[in-house]
Image (cartoon, rainbow, N blue to C red):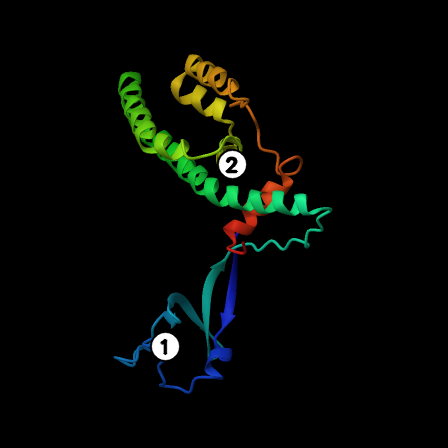
Amino acid sequence: MKRLFLLWILLCLAFLSPGIKAQGYYAANVNPETSNPVSTIFLMPNVYPAVILEGDTVACMWLTDFIKYSPLNFRSSRDRMAYSKLIRDVKKTLPYAKEIASIITETYEYMETLPDDKARQQHLNRMEKYLMDAYTPKMKKLTRSQGQLLMKLVDRETNSSSYHIIDAFMGSFKAWTYNVFAGLFGNSLKTRYNPYGEDRVTERVCVLVEQGIV
């Protein structure tokens, strides 16, 4: 959940005298061109809504939750290498998982606007062709372990297994067929993501990647 914080501008004003600009950006409660009061702050280089409290200009901004993890202690160099490999794989597959989750959401919302089952099925067929054309070349570049990780990360982003997603949009037969095909390569579309159990290290890496720390 995001929280609304107030960032006091006094720290900035301690280093910048009134009227001084830095690289075209300024922090003030008046427009320098008209000298009229404004309700925004221009601060290196973002623009924030602002309020004046007891004569002080205060910027209002949304800050995301920040999760701090304790350092990991590796029992061996093999464990350290496995962790480094996981970071590499998450960086490669997490963007795909987020893209897929976004497409699923947009597809569902659009289908709700279609008049009947025939129109919805036609749209699904077009989306299936688009996904196959757009993502098959990318998926072929993934290793087996990266493919397994991607299925779990899709679950992370959608809270649904790949099997359930295919079943909901394309029917039970296609879901069963795709799952049988995945099973030939040792995968399962029914695999679920468990951030508090077996996937807790993966969740740690995902969060660190999202925060830009690794």
Which of discs 2 and 1 lies nearer the camera? The answer is: 2
SS label for mark 2: helix
Residue at image coords 44%, 40%: 98
Q: Check contact, mark 2 vs mark 1: CB within 8 A.
A: no
Q: Is residue 190 above or below residue 74?
A: above
Residue 121, image quadrant: top left
Give the percent coordinates (x, y) of residue 69: 65, 53
In this view, the residue in front, 109 or 34, is 109
**Label for residue 26?**
1
Amino acid identity at mark 1: Tyr
Tag 2: amino acid: Leu
Quadrant location of the C terminus? Answer: bottom right
Upstream in sequence: badge 2 or badge 1: 1
Distance of label 2 from label 1 (alpha carbons): 41 Å
| Front residue of 179 and 105 | 179
The crowding category of the residue bearing disc 2, from other C-alpha atoms within 10 Å (few below 14, some 14 to 19, many at least 20), is many
Name the residue tied to disc 2: 153
The disc at residue 86 is none
In this rendering, the answer to whether 205 lies above or below 191 is: below
Of residue 124 and residue 181, the one placed in the foreground of this image is 181
Residue at position x 52%, y 45% in the image:
88
Q: Residue furthest front?
A: 77
